[in-house]
Image: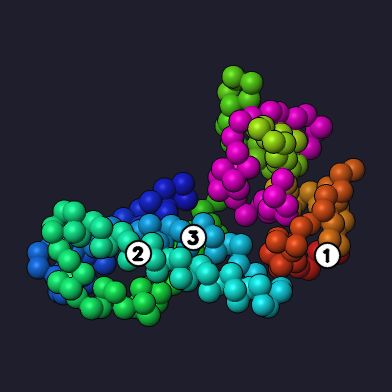
Amino acid sequence: MKKYFSLIYWLAVVLLMSLVFASVVDGYSQAFLLAIMFLPGALFVKFFIKDLSFENRLKGILYGGCLAVATLLIEYLCIVLTSWYLFKLTPGSLPDLIFNPVFIWLLLAAFIALERIISYYIIKAVPPDEFITFTSERKKISVRVDSILLVESRDSEVMIRMTDQTAYRTKMKISQWESVLDNRFLRVHRSYIINKNHISHQTLNEVTLKDLTIEVSRKYRDAFRQSVQGRS
């Protein structure tokens, strides 16, 4: 369920939005198309919003503003080009509501926030996977998830370091590992994902797992502090 949650969720969003748009355009096919055209902006926001931080307030405001404007331009471009190409519709023949920036921002913000809330409760409700399988040096490897110490990115390859000091090489990118590992794991650096259950010591800037000390980069510092809050 966790694996396919995002796909199922956004399909449901498209169906819901198409029903909303059906009341302001002619025909369900046009409404369904417009609903689909909101997805690129939503995926763009999902990908880049994780980099939004107000640790430096000015940079956070500038980044947020650029993200909002870029999202709006993506939505306008998708809606106009697709509507014109498939239905020969011009912007003047489309409802004003479709181009209202406040409407677009609120709609995307609401759906993305709802996805995070539902995903959080699904993760809490579903027992974590006991094993994970991946390819290492052309072989299928299956390991216990709780025995993974950390995931380390090294240029074109990723190292999976185990608690017993075994290490596996894989071509699976660290961003992919971040998406498949559960909430026992935390990204603390562009090159590291750690298993929180094996933290032996941490400060604001560093974390130690067994005999390895890893820097916590500024980008992930807030999330790290909140995630390990209460640990000594």
Q: Earlier in the sequence, mark 1 or mark 2?
A: 2
Residue 46 marker: 3
Residue type, numbered disc 2:
Glu
Q: Check disc 1 and report the residue beneath it.
A: 204
Q: Kindly report the distance in space between the C-alpha atoms of the residues bearing marks 1 and 2.
A: 39 Å
Please give the name of the residue rendered at 18% of the width and 54% of the height, measured from the top-left corner.
Answer: 85
Residue type, numbered disc 1:
Leu
Looking at the image, residue 122 lies above or below residue 164:
below
Q: Is residue 4 left or right of residue 55?
A: left
Q: In the image, is residue 174 part of the stretch drawn in magenta?
A: yes
Please give the name of the residue rendered at 41% of the width and 48% of the height, measured from the top-left corner.
Answer: 4
Residue 75 marker: 2
Residue 36 seen in this snapshot: yes
How many numbered dots are placed on residues in this image? 3
Please give the name of the residue rendered at 63% of the width and 73% of the height, measured from the top-left corner.
Answer: 60
Q: Nearer the viewer, mark 3 or mark 2?
A: 2
Density class for disc 1 (Cα within 10 Å; few <14, some 14-19, many ≥20) is few
User: Where is residue 13 shown, x and y percent of the image?
Assistant: 32, 62
Q: Kindly report the distance in space between the C-alpha atoms of the residues bearing marks 1 and 3.
A: 26 Å
Q: Is residue 199 left or right of residue 128?
A: right
Q: Nearer the viewer, mark 1 or mark 3?
A: 3
